[in-house]
Amino acid sequence: MKGLPLSPLVPLNRSPLPLVAGVRIAVGRAGFYKHDRPDLLLATMPAETRAAGVFTQHAVGSAPVDWCRAQFKAQGGAMRALLVNAGCANAFTGAAGAAAARASANAVSSATGIAPDSVALASTGVIGVVLDSEKIKSAMPGLAESLRPASLDAAAQAIMTTDTFPKWAGAETEIGGVRTTLAGIAKGSGMIAPNMATMLAFVFTDAKLPAPVLNAVLKAETAISFNSITVDGDRSTNDCVLLFATGQAPTPSIRSAADPDLAPFRSALGTVLKDLALQIVRDGEGATKLVTVIVTGAANAASAKRIARSICESPLVKTAIAGEDANWGRITMAVGKADEPVNRDRLSIRFGTLWAAKDGAVARDYSEEAMSRYMKGAELSIHVDVGVGSGEALMYTCDLTKRYVEINGDYRS
């Protein structure tokens, strides 16, 4: 099974992101946090821009998610601005939250001349608090005045909440021989799980692509990136991944996601999304280990993913990993509680290259000493074969430490 390349738990000395033609960026402060830090990101793009989005499946979606879903559909993906605030999720806020979202879009429109219905909104922070749109209005004139072509490095810092480092990734590729650039940022550390994996991600490219094509490639690549990670099993009300194509590169006309000319772009987009997704897992609240879980031999791919998720989200499995204990009995428990087809007598479990169990029993060459040494690593892999078919899945998670409890216990204190 093809996985994502593993790299150090915290990325260091990363190169600045490339500029994306047509994108203008501004970062500022509205005051959603008590301490002095940036909490607003504004991006504007030319009229040719088309966009796509993948949004949380959470039953209590936020006002900005509702706004984006409606406007992306109504505008056919013709979105020209993005406003992101940190410090207030504006989720579970009813009509007042919806009014605050519209007021925020209107504020962007007043300052930039872009129609409010072409403004995408995203928020992150505490749930159940109505966004104070007056703070947005007050900050917007200065934010709009500072718009300029710029790298997204500073933007990645403005959208952080409990993140311990800013997350960004970029790539250069081609479409039909024409060079094109991608640059993306993300935020997320806790409340991370599939559909969506509190996370926000925004990717910009200078390619000229229609909204239906952008939607198709974004949905496919999100499935194997952001929807294949989990930190704690808790989905957020605000998750979204937005992709903006400014159309400033003279790329050839692409009408289908299956067009062979689009293949290099799809690959580059997948690389950027997977890089961002793994950074979120590495930054899991209190995390000390990055864990790859591979499930094979399942009834089908969907079954394999449910088993993998059961392993990834088991508190007993995650705390054992935190304690550097290869307690493979907890893996067995997590496999069984997924309520998926499993052949107990063929169940096999491997940590890295070390077998813990084979064909339903303890491996003959099992070594507790070797396992203990392996578990001290910062990056681990667990491979489980359930022995019933050819379905397989790959997911990423982290350990569960005392620090996770401290971070979330103190979050509003």
Image (cartoon, grey):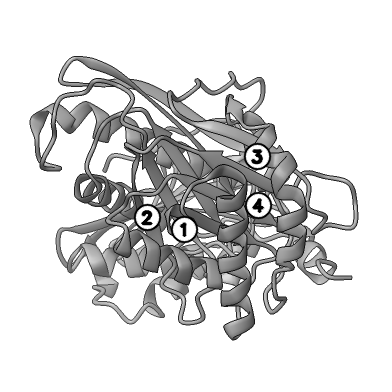
- Residue tagged by mark 1? 240
- 334 and 73: which one is in front? 73
* Left or right, residue 306 beside residue 351: left
Q: Are marks 3 and 4 in contact (CB under 8 Å)?
A: no
Nearer the camera: disc 3 or disc 4: 3
Q: Disc 2 residue type?
A: Gly
Work out how far the residue at label 4 is from the one at label 2, CA to CA, in angstroms.
39 Å
The amino acid at mark 1 is: Cys
Amino acid type for the residue under numbered disc 4: Glu
Look at the image and tell me in which quarter the C terminus lies.
Answer: bottom right
Q: Secondary structure at mark 1?
A: strand
- Give how far across and how far down residue 311 sits, in percent: 46, 66
Residue hosting label 3: 144
Residue at 35%, 39% in the rendered image: 49
Which amino acid lies under the numbered mark 3 shown in the image of this protein? Ala
Instruction: Measure how far apart labels 4 and 1 are at the Cα level.
Output: 34 Å
- Disc 2 to disc 1: CB gap under 8 Å: yes
Looking at marks 3 and 2 on the same chain, the residue that comes earlier in the sequence is marked by 2
Which residue is identified by label 2?
53
- Contact between marks 1 and 3 (CB within 8 A): the answer is no
Question: In the figure, residue 91 lies in which quadrant?
Answer: bottom right
Q: Earlier in the sequence, mark 3 or mark 4?
A: 3
Image quadrant assignment for residue 295: bottom left
Label 1 vs 3, first from the N-terminus: 3
